[in-house]
Amino acid sequence: MTTQADPTAPNRVLVLNSGSSSVKYQLLDMGDHGRLASGLVERIGEEGGVADHGEALRQVARRLADQGVGLDSPALAAIGHRVVHGGTRFTEPTVITDEVLAEIEKLVPLAPLHNPANITGIKVARELRPDLPQVAVFDTAFHSTLPEAAARYAIDAATADRFGIRRYGFHGTSHAYVSRATAELLGRPVAEVNTIVLHLGNGASASAVRGGVCVDTSMGLTPLEGLVMGTRSGDIDPAVVFHLQRVGGMGTEEIDTLLNKRSGLLGLCGANDMREIGRRIGEGDRDARLAFDVYVHRLRRYVGAFTAVLGRVDAIAFTAGVGENSAAVRAAAMSGLEHLGIELDPVHNAVRASGPRVVSTAASRVAVAVVPTDEELEIARDTYALARS
Ligand code: ADP
């Protein structure tokens, strides 16, 4: 284990996030957390894009080389991969070996839309730099501490066990980063702070974090459960599915697409971007208004539920695209909650800024904060820590 900082030791980490049709990358200097390079290769397998993930990663490698920070650099310490589903097998960042890769492949049925792309990214990166430590950082890992009472669905236990049906939760890297950054913002040890984290991006999830340990989360077996999202329904009565099959004559794939891609804000009003919804509300659009109201109603439900789960709430942290940028969503979600000790400061809330900040009043018992997430930095830290140990 290296304890002393060695200025000649490799200290760069490449973070790869291989999605179904894109690869995002960031190269970080772990000395000062500076971004040396970042970018996105899109439309993988689509017209006008690159053929496959292999080609996408080779393009990333070429771009890095062009910028003078190529994959062959001796300064590169490790490559960190975002992996969506770690099942119950992976509860921590893990150095990738053949055995680990085989285990991740076994989890594909739990995340058929996500894990295959992550796996391809890992394979190609290992071909490009077989000598380098490569680390998998799982989106589910932070939620592995959920108590059984929160993780279990109330269905036949044998069926649940046989098919791995339970709440896993996602966006864990973000929830971990933001809950820690919130404690830092408040100047308190993370072990003493209870936080509700609201990650509101295109995908959206809430988590209840007690002293740095996640005790509840809104996403479940898949990222479909919980909050209203850009294109996902979030919570619905599961019997809606049977109804659509029996009465609507719809097939499984069709319903999957409906709930994941054509629901949420998009399904309600035809737009999934909160900026457009805000504009349309300003023009008097009633569908946009309803979409906003359904979104906020669900959010408030989870704030109430997680307040009950935590007992004492010290902070509510808003993060990701909507959480960081939409003062209107924050104001609507927090309004009328004075009886819970929540008092938003309208002036602070309206300020546009990029850093973490408190947006509640000085008298508010619960600190409401905007805390920009940084999943890449969190993955890089986890990766670097393992690579050096
Ligand atoms: P992803 O889940 O794709 O990582 P992000 O966290 O980047 O998503 O969030 C994207 C969403 O953030 C957009 O769809 C949009 O709804 C919202 N958003 C971004 N900027 C703003 C803004 N200035 N005001 C309101 N919403 C915004």
Image (cartoon, rainbow, N blue to C red):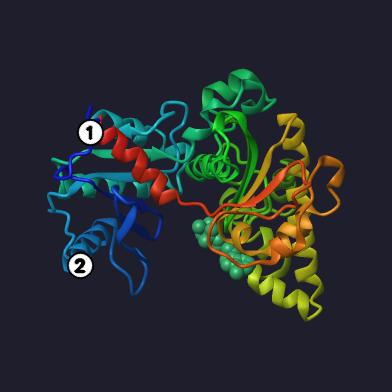
Mark 2 element type: loop
Question: Residue 335 occupies which quadrant of the picture?
Answer: bottom right
**Mark number displayed over residue 271:** none
Secondary structure of the residue carrying numbered label 1: loop
Give, as a three-letter code, the residue at label 2.
Gln
Marks 1 and 2, how far apart at CA: 30 Å
The residue nearer to you, when weighing 346 against 196, is: 346
Q: Quadrant of the N terminus?
A: top left
Q: Which residue is mark 2?
A: 67
Percent coordinates x, y for residue 310 in the rendering: 71, 30
| On screen, residue 347 above or below 220 | below
> Which residue type carries mark 1?
Gln
Q: Nearer the viewer, residue 286 or 157?
A: 286
| Displayed quadrant of residue 6 | top left
Q: Camera-side residue: 38 or 41?
A: 38
Judge from the rendering whether residue 131 lies leftward or rightward of residue 137; answer left or right.
left
Q: Quadrant of ligand 1?
A: bottom right
Using residue 3 as the reference point, say whether residue 313 is left or right of it. Answer: right
Residue 309 in the figure: left or right of residue 126: right
Q: On the image, numbered disc 1 is attached to which residue?
A: 4
**Total numbered labels:** 2
Horizontal and vertical percent position of residue 239: 74, 41
* Badge 2 residue CB within 8 Å of ligand 1: no
377 shown above or below 97: below
Q: Position of residue 343 (x, y in %)?
A: 79, 50
Is residue 8 depicted above or below 91 in this figure? below
Q: Neighbour class for label 2 at 10 Å: few (<14), some, many (≥20)?
A: few
